[in-house]
Amino acid sequence: MNKVLMKGNEAIGEAAIRAGCLNYFAYPITPQSEVAEYLSKRMPEVGGVFLQGESEVAVSYMIFGAAACGERVFTTSSSPGISLMSEGISYIVGAECPAVFVNIMRGGPGLGGILPSQADYLQATKGIGHGDCRLLVMAPASVQEAVEMVMMAFPLAEKYRNPVIILGDGLIGQMMEPVVFPDHLKSAPSNKDDWATSGMETRKSNKRNLVKSLYLDPEALNAHNLKLKAKYDRMKEEEIRYVTYNTEGDYSVLIVSYGTMSRVCRSALESLKTQGLEVALVRPQTLFPFPEKAVFDAASKESCRHVLSVEMSMGQMVEDIERSVQGKRPVSWYGKCGGEVPTPEEVMDAVKDLMRT
Amino acid sequence: MAKTFLKPKCLSDQETHYCPGCTHGIIHRLVAEAIDALGIAGRTVGIAPVGCAVICYNYFTFDFQEAAHGRAPAMATGIKRVRPDLMVFTYQGDGDLASIGMGEIVHAANRGEKFTTVFVNNAVYGMTGGQMAPTTMPDQKTTTTPFGRRVEEVGMPVRMAELLATLSTPGYISRQAVLAPKYVLRAKKAIRKAFQYQMENRCFSFVEVISTCPTNWGMTPTEAIDWAQKTMLPYYPLGDLKTPEPVKEG
């Protein structure tokens, strides 16, 4: 397939279709409404389902109902909308259904703003819903990567029978970049006969299926949570993804940054290099599971004096970095949270300040 | 000796957890009879609410999903949109449907989603211990209206069937009761019709069923039946509020 120039939000919609997901339910919210606008035209062309729900709360349950039938389904939203969906997300996790959520983050808290942000890090990685509830969290740094992650997300959600969330900052949705779409995914959800409410007569077993999250017996609920924990532990074993930059030689500062922010950090890294200042970068592609070992290894390099988290939030990733670094190096934070993306120069200044200490 | 009265095939053998005198058992049976009569158990998905009927899936033998409080119509929407061939019904109480789930039922009905809702109205929250519902009658005592429902503070009870019948799209809106055999027979017909319309892919179908809750009303089952007839039926009149346009011949 040829390279096409596409807006991130539209590319995300197209990627889902190419991942074999023909079911989309959504509620409009800036800065990602273009996904719904795009799919309202595109889904009818491919015989898919497009429905604008009455609220994000309702949409999360449309996703639940469809996912529980064993059909590929996804939605997109932005920060306040994801808060409303978090009830449904918890039920979907509890009921072990696969689904894909995309959060094109805007500033918060409350209505916040409509400009890019990364301030839903903790929500996505630690607090996406009530109960012991985790999602696999992937953070793209380009429109191309957003497309690839959306296409990976469906088989991953099905592998774990657990939702996957793509955490993109507003820029990922709004900017136009060249994209090459990978081939269509030919796979379909497997083993769904064991659990999906697809209608008894569609299955050989003739056994009825029940999709639920209620376990009134304490032993049964504990066993259920242990089963969910085993899935999260398996994600930590098998799904950690990250990219490192400039970690081969010596460096005095390690930056950890993801999404669009990491691209600014790469520019800063290159400019600092021309000034004879060596900085390394670890870019997590999965935020849960977090690339703990990669961050630990990079921070443990003898020449490394400081670790800097650069993010468009008030330092939400710092705790994960500190946990990974295990006290070996001091961890500090630089970022902005009003919708402005820090410039390479600002990142360079923050790095130089650290080098002076 | 010939058997003249059988348990519907799609009701399980499990004993229910419902209180003595509760009418959920009758309504479960009416739903099961409709599904058996239409021969659709193999492609039916029920959606359980939050409330007393939260584990009603234990009493049916076909596929079931369990909703969050009030969200069953959104789940049913999700199912019907991606699998229009499935027969889908939500089974919801008054706290679930008329309070926390008011938005979901109104919009699903207004979109004309082709599923069936069985709405059990017993004028009280049952499972949580008898608190006021939107359908609680004026002056009715509940655990959160110890002096009776004061309508000047919390308004008059919501008439869901009438409210939904104001919408242009929903096709079949009916209110029935299970307070005496004659009512049960009419409710049976209405529920059967509701599923029939869904089978024909004609419309959203909604059957409200006036029911009793002797435990939370603090009454014996027979007192509860009498109270519902005297107090609820005048405010919640029975019958079809809306029926779909007849199918045009040829």
Image: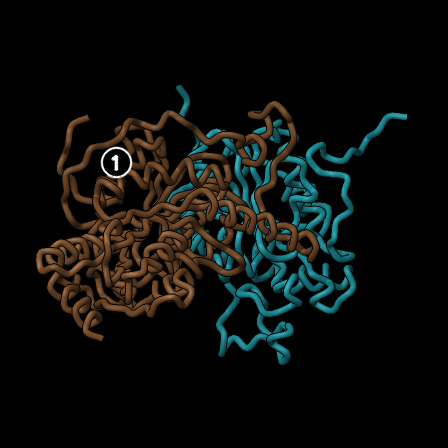
Say which quarter of the image contains residue A14: top left
Q: Nearer the viewer, residue A256 or A171?
A: A256
Q: Quadrant of the N terminus of chain A?
A: top left
Q: Residues within 10 Å of mark 1 (few under 14, many from 20)?
A: many
Q: Residue furthest top?
A: B250
Q: Which residue is disc 1 drawn over?
A: A14
Q: Is residue A151 above or below residue A167?
A: above
Q: Is residue A289 above or below residue B189?
A: below
Q: Residue furthest right?
A: B1
Chain of residue at mark 1: A
Query: Horizontal placement of A137 versus A254: left or right?
Result: right
Question: Residue A232 location, x and y as percent?
Answer: 50, 49
Residue B28 visible, this orientation: yes
Q: Quadrant of the C terminus of chain A?
A: bottom left
Chain ID, cyan in image: B
Q: Residue furthest bottom?
A: B147
Give me the residue at 29% from left, 38% from top. Answer: A148
Q: Nearer the viewer, residue B114 or A39?
A: A39
Amino acid type for the residue under numbered disc 1: Glu
Query: Horizontal placement of A150 versus B6: left or right?
Result: left
Rendered colour, chain A:
brown
Say which quarter of the image contains residue B132: bottom right
Give me the residue at 51% from left, 59% from top. Answer: B98
Q: Is residue A3 above or below residue B100?
A: above
Which of the colour schemes (rainbow, by chain, secondary structure, one colour) is used? Answer: by chain
Question: Residue A271 location, x and y as percent?
Answer: 10, 57
Give me the residue at 56% from left, 48% from top. Answer: A230
Q: Nearer the viewer, residue B57 or A133?
A: A133
Q: Secondary structure at mark 1?
A: helix
Question: Residue B41 location, x and y as percent?
Answer: 62, 31
Label total for image: 1
